[in-house]
């Protein structure tokens, strides 16, 4: 069962009166966005129980500290770029082996800065709920956050184009793009971020790419519905309000 199939069966009134901090990534995007849309409660795109908390040092420590910072609600705070990352898959049926530490970098795809409400999550899952009552309506000035994993170049083009024809790119003031773990460029030589630029077709929106709130390790935490400022040129992200 995937998470968007659960959305009609969640008791949102109970969640309003008994608020919980909901955190997760990937397919859980549907629940994070649905809970925020139906209750107004901030949710968190961040580590899950097994694939993040089941990792070894030092990746675990970075993920845990970022999660603690986000869940504390103490603002403002900065999302710090970890000095390294890994995009290796974990073979959970065998003993964990140490992951290689790849020197980290974020990428300025289009310059500029933006401040606004953060809406987003896993790109594939967003496209599965975008026309539903559980998807928050994008407002002028929102910051769009997207990430995906193990997709083809054609997938990225399809999903980005769906956002374009839905009018999302005409409303957002900036885009944060997570690393795409094990992206298949299908011989194009292009990254998923390159394909996003093609779909935008010259539309000038500040874009900071390759951030670490995604399927790679470590996993940083971002508040869905929170107010965020980022500067693509300075490659900085600050959470102003949760």
Image (cartoon, grey):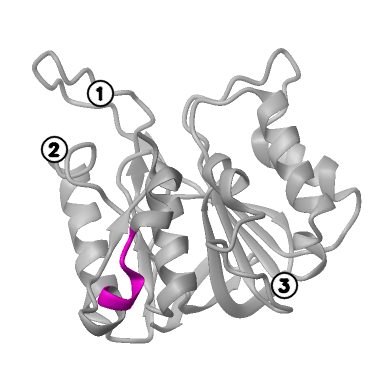
In the rendered structure, does residue 15 fall within the stretch colored magenta?
no
Q: For numbered disc 2, what is the local secondary structure?
A: loop
Residue 26 visible (yes or no): no
* Image location of residue 90, percent across then percent down: 25, 23
* Image location of residue 146, percent across then percent down: 56, 51
* Image location of residue 8, percent across then percent down: 42, 56
Q: Nearer the viewer, residue 122 or 134?
A: 134
Residue drawn at x 67%, y 29% as measured from the top left: 155
Image quarter where the N terminus lies is: top left
* Magenta-colored span: 10-14
Q: CA distance from mark 2 to mark 1?
A: 10 Å
**For residue 11, above or below residue 154:** below
Q: Earlier in the sequence, mark 2 or mark 3?
A: 2
Give left or right: position of 89 versus 38. Answer: left
Q: CA distance from mark 3 to mark 1?
A: 36 Å
In the picture of the structure, the residue carrying the numbered disc 3 is 173
Q: Earlier in the sequence, mark 3 or mark 1?
A: 1
Residue drawn at x 31%, y 67% as measured from the top left: 11
Q: For numbered disc 1, what is the local secondary structure?
A: loop
């Amino acid at each position: 069962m995937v998470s968007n199939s659960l959305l009609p069966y969640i008791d949102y009134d109970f969640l309003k009166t008994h608020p919980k901090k909901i955190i997760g990534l990937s397919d859980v995007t549907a629940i994070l966005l649905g809970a925020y849309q139906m209750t107004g409660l901030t949710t968190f795109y961040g580590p899950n129980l097994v694939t993040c908390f089941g990792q070894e040092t030092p990746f675990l420590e970075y993920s845990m500290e970022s999660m603690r910072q986000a869940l504390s609600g103490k603002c403002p705070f900065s999302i710090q770029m970890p000095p390294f990352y890994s995009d290796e898959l974990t073979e959970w049926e065998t003993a964990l082996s140490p992951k290689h530490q790849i020197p980290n970098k974020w990428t300025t795809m289009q310059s500029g800065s933006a401040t606004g409400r953060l809406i987003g999550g896993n790109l594939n899952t967003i496209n599965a709920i975008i026309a539903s009552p559980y998807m928050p309506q994008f407002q002028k000035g929102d910051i769009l956050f997207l990430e995906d994993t193990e997709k083809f170049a054609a997938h990225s083009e399809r999903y980005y184009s769906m956002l374009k024809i839905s009018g999302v790119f005409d409303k957002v003031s900036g885009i944060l793009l997570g690393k795409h773990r094990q992206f298949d460029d299908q011989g194009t030589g292009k990254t998923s971020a390159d394909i996003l630029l093609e779909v935008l077709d010259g539309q000038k929106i500040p874009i900071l790419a390759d951030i670490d709130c995604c399927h790679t390790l470590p996993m940083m935490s971002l508040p869905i519905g929170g107010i965020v400022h980022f500067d693509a040129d300075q490659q900085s992200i600050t959470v102003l309000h949760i």
